[in-house]
Amino acid sequence: MNLKNSFLSFYLVLVSFPIMSTNIIVPNEEILEKPFPLPYERVDLSVSDLRNFIDNTINNKKQPVVIFGANWCPDCRILSAVLDLETVNEYMNDNFEILYIDLGRYDINMSLMEFFDIMPQQGIPRVVILNKDKEVLNIKDTGEWTTARSRTKQEIFNYFQEYKE
């Protein structure tokens, strides 16, 4: 009898574990607003600007997120639109600070991609998520969102939730 109770307890913990670790869900009524945002400003940034952003973000007890892209890129704009959804935006503002870096027509800020050892020919948007020790957490999949238009808002949101420290 004791073995049966132990098994039942183990089973209940095992079954409830996914519920305890579930990501925040984006409500169905939150839809992408059109026209999609134009988050990139044609500003030439330096490595020093990038380092300052990272340091200031960490000093604010948040994780830095750097998103390389351009306003002409539909996947960049869709990603930004998802990040603007109320539930996602609230979560992001509580945990991260985002720096959008404009690449123009691949004629501006390209050296900043090299700062993270990202090859520019691999497409945009490129998302870089750092921890509070300035280490890139998602170096193997910074190009995950070059096909953002074929992904759901929940998939995009889950990605950022997975990298939260």
Image (cartoon, rainbow, N blue to C red):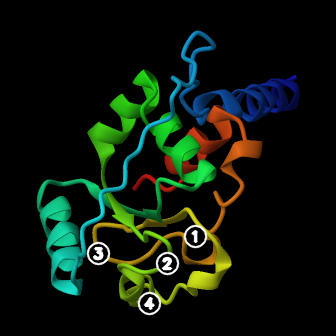
Nearer-N-terminus badge (1/2): 2
Residue 88, quarter of picture: top left
Residue at (50% x, 34% y) in the render:
36
Q: Which residue is mark 4?
A: 114
Separation (CA) of disc 1 from disc 2: 17 Å
Kind of residue indicated by mark 2: Tyr
Residue at (46% x, 27% y) in the render:
85
Nearer-N-terminus badge (4/2): 2
Asked whether the residues under the numbered discs 1 and 2 touch, taking CB atoms below 8 Å apart as contact, a structural biologist would say no
Q: Which residue is mark 1?
A: 142
Q: Which residue is mark 3?
A: 133
* Crowding near the residue tagged with mark 2, few <14, some 14–19, many ≥20 C-alpha atoms within 10 Å: few
Foreground tag (3 vs 4):
4
Above or below — where is 35 with respect to 45?
above
Nearer-N-terminus badge (3/2): 2
Which circle marks residue 27 in the picture? Answer: none
Kind of residue indicated by mark 3: Asp
Relative placement, left or right, of 117 versus 29 is left
Foreground tag (3 vs 2):
2
Separation (CA) of disc 3 from disc 4: 19 Å
**Quadrant, the N terminus:** top right
Q: Which residue is mark 2?
A: 106
The x, y position of residue 61, in whole percent, is 18, 54
Foreground tag (4 vs 1):
4
Closest to the observer: 60 or 39? Answer: 39
Kind of residue indicated by mark 4: Glu
